[in-house]
Amino acid sequence: MAKMTKEEVRQTKDWMKTEEYKELNFKRKSIVINPERACQPLGAVLCSAGFEGTMPFVHGSHGCVAYYRNNLSRHFREPIAAVSTSLTEDGAVFGGQANGFEGFKNCLNLYKPKMFAISTTCMTEVIGDDLGAIVNNARAKGFLPEDVPAPYANTPSFVGSHIDGYDNMLAAIIDTLGVKGESVSDVINIIPGFDTTTGNINEIKRLLTIMKVPYLVIADYSNTLDSPLNGEYKLYNEGATTLEDTKNCVNNKATIALQKFSTKKTIALLADKFKQEAKAVKSPVGIKFTDEFLMAVSEITGKEIPKEIEDERGRAVDSMTDAQQYIHGKKFAIFGDPDILTGLTSYLLEMGGIPKYVLCSNGNEEFKNDVEALLKEYGCDEGEVYIDKDLWHLHSLVMTGPVDMLIGPSHGKFVAREAGVPHIRLGYPIFDRVNIHRYPFYAYSGVINLTTWIVNKFIEIVDDTSDDAHFELLR
């Protein structure tokens, strides 16, 4: 094959920015280029990190688990514990039960977990390993003690995404540990969903504390994946949801999930099997969805919204009013997970921004309908919603229909650079910025943070591109 000249490379790159190329790009069926989603077991591992003394136990190859640990560690900048059954070619032919037995024995001796949270990978799903049989046989043969819970979930990597893996694992843990009693407590359960912003979880806990609402966060990794650096390493950090609380969570007053699309199976389990009032609200991003979340809490608990929170709302609205002129009419391309995108769309519309492209690699028709309903509600006829599309599709979109800013995880930086527009990092994963996951974009504090990040980036660009005559002190 002849090597392309520099001029041919330039011409090809220019052609890839055209409507002609965009049409061809959107016709492709058999290849995915840079999808903004991960596989199911990664979500299962994240969910497992939210429970006391729990070891994520992945039935599959060592390389798969290295990928989950590597990705999560890069995002949180924390060590992520997980083990695998280290299947090789032998396991693919003869099955992985023997590796499972050995894995339970070694992990118990080395790491002494209080619970295993077992998930699968492509290999074990393709060969058809039966997790239930492996767990039962391991107990019968003495490899897995009866007093160590071992919930398991099938999380095939070739279907769904990380949000499905999170949901499957959480449902399995609650189903295994939950014991229905005769009395109901005043506690409400909060399920964050697949949310890798620990600041969001802490912000919700702070608001519930102000409201004096007794609550339990199920799968709480806000401390285990954001632990203090005090010179002492703990394999299992404090602050995760205890196994006893998980056992009793089915007897609490109600459950509110902060994400709809990553908790469907879990919410159905709580409602159908345990007869608990369980509902998912829109992720509390922006004023409207935060109001709806707090009103849902108030209605369930009978607690009034205190003046302290009303004042926080007022300050958030004030911050939006002060900055609205910088966002009004600006066009945005946003991408990531469905629940975050729904909330972010609502916030941008509240600010007078235009969510020009809303691209969700793991979105479905329900998500698309939700976002399109928001666009219609605000009279925004320029917004376009894309599901099951990747970031190379997004490249074609912003090259043929320019935007003013990208908002989404780190993978979008290549599109942003070629388009010559700023990129605000939000969601998962964030590899190329530090501490972002510690700042909430939920609730009224999150409104202020989002407004500050977006508007100040626009102002910085004006300063950086101004000549001396227009380098103003006031912006």
Image (spheres, helix red, strand yellow):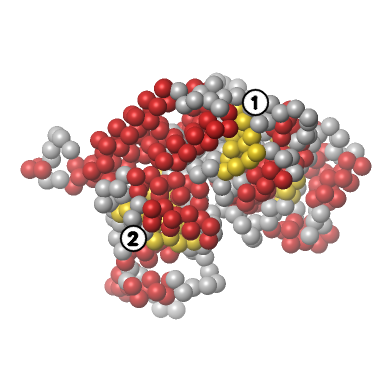
Question: Which residue is most to the bottom?
Answer: 1
Name the residue located 57 percent from the left edge and 53 percent from the top edge: 38
Most foreground residue, 437 or 285: 285
Residue 205 position, x and y percent, is: 53, 28
Residue topped by disc 2:
381
Q: Is residue 190 left or right of residue 91?
A: left
On the image, numbered disc 1 is attached to which residue?
A: 186
> For the point 50% across and 48% down, which residue is it?
339
Q: Earlier in the sequence, mark 1 or mark 2?
A: 1
Q: Is residue 67 left or right of residue 472?
A: right
Q: Is residue 408 above or below residue 361?
A: above
- From the top left corner, tell me how far across and down residue 337 is, in percent: 50, 51
Amino acid at pointer 1: Asp
Kind of residue at badge 2? Asp
Distance from Cα at disc 1 to Cα at disc 2: 45 Å
Image coordinates of residue 346 in percent, x first then y, are 40, 47
Residue at 37% across, 25% down: 311
Q: Quadrant of the N terminus?
A: bottom left
Instruction: Locate residue 275: give its quadrant.
Output: top right
Q: Residues within 10 Å of mark 2 (few under 14, many from 20)?
A: few
Q: Nearer the viewer, residue 305 or 361?
A: 305
Q: Is residue 237 visible?
A: no
Query: Circle 2 — which element?
Result: loop
